[in-house]
Image (cartoon, rainbow, N blue to C red):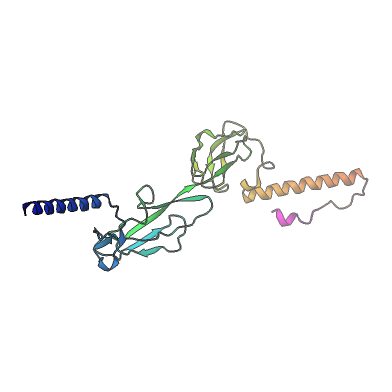
Amino acid sequence: MKKKVLLMTLALALMMQSSVMAEATHKHIWEDDIKNSNETINRYTCECGATKDEVIADIRDYVITFDANGGYVEEPEKETYKGRIKWLPIPEHTSDYQWEGWFTEPEGGVLVDNTWIYEEDTTLYAQWTLKGTRTLTFACDGGSYIRPITRKLGETVDLAGYVPEKQGYIFKGWYEDPRTKENEVTEYTFNGNGVLYAKWEADPTKEQPDTLMTTDTIYLTDEQYYERISRIQAIIEELIERYLNTKGASKGAPFSMSWRNSYGK
């Protein structure tokens, strides 16, 4: 009788040990147990019968706002389910930008994926990386030539070393508006191709050459523009008169250009 009890005890111990070893070596494949989950618990089950619970947010319906941060997103808001969003939207931008993902901040922050658990209404921000290169051109308005600069998109250049020279004038900086010359640009960020215009101030210690006929039209005031037109008309009239005199044409009434009054004062 004692032998039977001993054998049964040994057999039971072996069975329990085998069960523990099987449990230790078994790899659980967890699947959502929707029926037994609720607002605060996600329950998972394995085909072996094992279960595990995962605590989630107390409220499942948080509003997640997607800020495209300069781009465009078709679905700017989503509601969570069990504290999560299964699919994050993919934003769009111009071909100059590459999307890097959704982050908790417009710059820096933490990268968020579809496993993220939300505990409150949240705004996520798209972050972008600029691609390619762009060129900055210098319009020197009669000054010495400055070679254009080509840099990677997003790169910033200090303009302190880009100084043209012009006889009789002092360089007063670079500007985006060629006429008003307001808000000097001291550094340029290559978010696109651009043109900067030189501003000049007459040097009182030097004589300034007459540059009315050589200055780019974009820099001229209305008064200077009409003065240039008047000079051009006078030159044309003189050339025609010389031509007529050379050909021996009779001299009658002085030659006049009927379109002078359309431009001149």
Q: Residue at x 35, y 58 (%)?
A: 123
Find out whether residue 135 is within the magenta segment: no
**Nearest to the observer: residue 253 or residue 211:** 211
Q: Residue at x 36, y 57 (%)?
A: 114
User: Which quadrant does the C terminus fall into?
Assistant: bottom right
Q: Disc count in the image? A: 0
Prevailing secondary structure of the magenta residues: loop
Residue 128 x/y as whole percent: 45, 50
The relative height of residue 221 versus residue 205 in the rendered view (above or below) is below
Residue 169 x/y as whole percent: 58, 35
Horizontal arrangement in the rendering, residue 29 relative to residue 147 (left or right): left
Horizontal arrangement in the rendering, residue 104 relative to residue 221 (left or right): left
**Nearest to the observer: residue 153 or residue 60:** 60
**Nearest to the observer: residue 21 or residue 172:** 21
Outermost residue toward the bottom in this view: 35
Outermost residue toward the top in this view: 205
The relative height of residue 171 versus residue 110 in the rendered view (above or below) is above
Classify residue 67 by image quadrant.
bottom left
Q: Residue at x 42, y 52 (%)?
A: 101
Report the magenta residues as a range.
256-265
Visible residue check, residue 148: yes
Horizontal arrangement in the rendering, residue 236 relative to residue 17 (left or right): right
The relative height of residue 243 versus residue 89 in the rendered view (above or below) is above
Horizontal arrangement in the rendering, residue 34 relative to residue 207 (left or right): left
Find out whether residue 259 is within the magenta segment: yes
Residue 58 x/y as whole percent: 23, 63
Residue 185 x/y as whole percent: 50, 42
Visible residue check, residue 185: no
User: Which quadrant does the N terminus fall into?
Assistant: bottom left
